[in-house]
Amino acid sequence: MRLLVTGCAGFIASRVTEALVRNGHEVVGVDNLNDAYDPRLKEWRLGRLRALSGFSWHSLDILERGALLELLPSHPVKAVLNLAARAGVRQSLVNPWIYYATNVTGILNLLELCRELGTQTFVLASTSSLYAGNEGAFREDLPTDRPLSRTRPLRKPQRRWPTRTIACSASMWRCCGTSPCMGRRGGPT
């Protein structure tokens, strides 16, 4: 099956992409390699993915609806996995508009494209670093070992949208990390 994975050079998306390709799927990956964190890390992950047969990468932003509309008809997909998002809590306070654009308008662009092109499956994953139970501004030395909520287990589907509006099955998954520490591949350890 051919799938579109957005944000394919990110920590979670690169691992999902690798697993999909290694399991026999074809992945069309898109990522704008923004500078929310060091783009060299994204380029390193992308280099690993490019070595895989069954993966193709396209440099574009999910805000570029026209570019997505040009790409998808020539690379029809059965499912869209939207793993693109702006990273970093602190930067979202400095420039909330880019976070809003990517995380709201970008998702709307993808949902509309699914509707227009007849793509039947859409999965949105939301990630967050947990800083639960701390008062005041966040600091590097605050504990991050308490879950944000005991009622939200990791990787639990959060929402099913009505499918008659967008004409596809849509799910949202929340993948939570508990540490800002970066591991070997540049993600939570």
Image (spheres, helix red, strand yellow):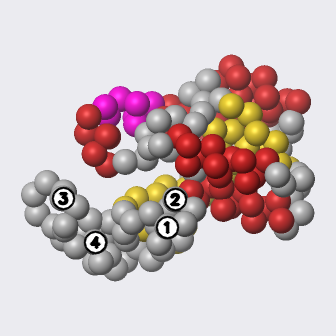
Residue 113 numbered tag: none
Mark 4 or 2: in front is 2
4 and 1 marks in contact (CB < 8 Å): no
Give the spatial CA distance, label 2 vs label 3.
20 Å
Question: Mark 3: which secondary structure?
Answer: loop
- In front of the other: 162 or 50: 50
Q: How many marks?
A: 4
- In front of the other: 172 or 46: 46
Mark 4 or 1: in front is 1
Task: Identify the residue shown where x is 86% and y is 36%.
Answer: 75
Image: magenta residue range: 95-101
1 and 3 marks in contact (CB < 8 Å): no
- In front of the other: 181 or 157: 181
Residue type at mark 2: give it: Gly
Q: Earlier in the sequence, mark 4 or mark 2?
A: 4
Vertical order, 72 against 80 (above or below): above
Give the spatial CA distance, label 3 vs label 4.
10 Å
Horizontally, residue 49 falls left or right of residue 12, namely right
- The residue that mark 1 highlights is 183
Residue type at mark 1: give it: Gly
Residue 138 in picture, x, y percent from top left: 19, 57
- The residue that mark 2 highlights is 186
Mark 1 nearby-residue class (10 Å; few <14, some 14–19, many ≥20): few
Give the spatial CA distance, label 4 vs label 1.
16 Å
- The residue that mark 3 highlights is 139
- The residue that mark 4 highlights is 144
Residue type at mark 3: give it: Arg
Give the spatial CA distance, label 1 vs label 2.
5 Å
